[in-house]
Image (spheres, helix red, strand yellow):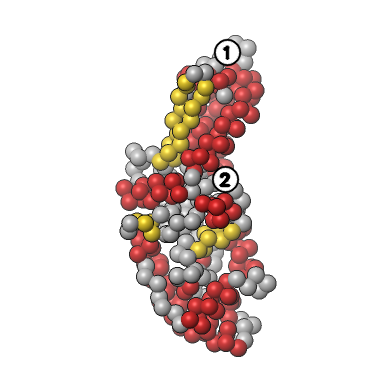
Amino acid sequence: MKSSPLPNIIEPDNFEKFIKYRSGDTRVNLLNVQKKIVYYYSHYNNHGEDVHKIIPNKLKAQEKNTMIDVYESYTSKAIISFRDTLFTHISNCPYCGLGETVHLDHYLPKSEFSEYSLFTLNLIPCCYKCNSTYKKTGYNENGTRVYFHPYIDEINDFDVLRISLRFQNDCILLHYGINQSSTLGPGILQVLKKHFKHLKLRERYLKYANRYLADMKPVFNDDYGANRDSQQLMSALDSKYKDALAEFGRNHWKTALLKNLKNNNQFCNGGFLLA
């Protein structure tokens, strides 16, 4: 999970690009929406972390259909350029950190909020699994947001992701979760817990972590050395942790795992051989 600044797209001026070269009813409908778009986008911005409390603006049926049709006009040069800018800006899924961004998720779904179909702040580049396999629930659950919003929620400077490691029956058992002792506010922590649950991140992260431990066992063994130097292994793990922190941020499955491993005496004193 990772927050991101917005790409360098000027709103609402960017809306002009979607009108250019349009004709007929499509152009008329877009021009009608443009008259209201400044209000719509300001309304979204002003809600901040309460974005889930926005009530859909009632566009006319033909305007709603046009907004969705224009977003889905994948042969349009304006749309292709717009999508490319978003994907280039965020190349790794901010929802999970696992996959390449190949989909644009409408944080507020375009079926209900067609006025935000082309709004940068509402379009989250994400991976196939997050958007198509797991993100089936609505954006609002019992008055709370369900999903982390990478453009609105600032989490990069906080230890949000927690992992515990224990040894049982000659096995290493890992458990991922949301860090309840994080200094983030209780509201965003609640959102992150829902996000973590609905996207099945515990199971997905565990799969990657177990594979990583198995694949890295020979490397850890070399770092440990013939002299069984736990300090040497800790130092090597610390270096790997810093690399992961720089590349992925602190709330990535690998960064959280390496942070735990480098501080775990049992793991560094030969426990890694159980992986």
Res. 191 mark? none
Q: Position of residue 104 (x, y in %)?
A: 56, 61
Q: Position of residue 115 (x, y in %)?
A: 47, 74
- Residue lying at 47% horizontally and 61% vertically, measured from the top left: 107
Asked whether, in this view, residue 13 is left or right of residue 36, the answer is: right
- Residue lying at 62% horizontally and 15% vertically, measured from the top left: 225
The C terminus lies in which quarter of the figure? top right
| Mark 2, secondary structure of its residue | loop
- Residue lying at 48% horizontally and 70% vertically, measured from the top left: 111
Q: Nearer the viewer, mark 2 or mark 1?
A: 2
Q: CA distance from mark 2 to mark 1?
A: 34 Å
- Residue lying at 56% horizontally and 36% vertically, measured from the top left: 207
Q: Is residue 171 visible?
A: yes
Q: Could you tell me if the residues under marks 2 and 1 are in contact, i.e. CB atoms within 8 Å?
A: no
Q: Is residue 66 above or below residue 273?
A: below
**Looking at numbered disc 2 in the image, what kind of residue is underneath it?**
Leu
Res. 98 mark? 2
- In the rendered image, the residue lying farthest to the top is 227
Q: Earlier in the sequence, mark 2 or mark 1?
A: 2
| Mark 1, secondary structure of its residue | loop
Residue named by callout 1: 228
**Looking at numbered disc 1 in the image, what kind of residue is underneath it?**
Arg
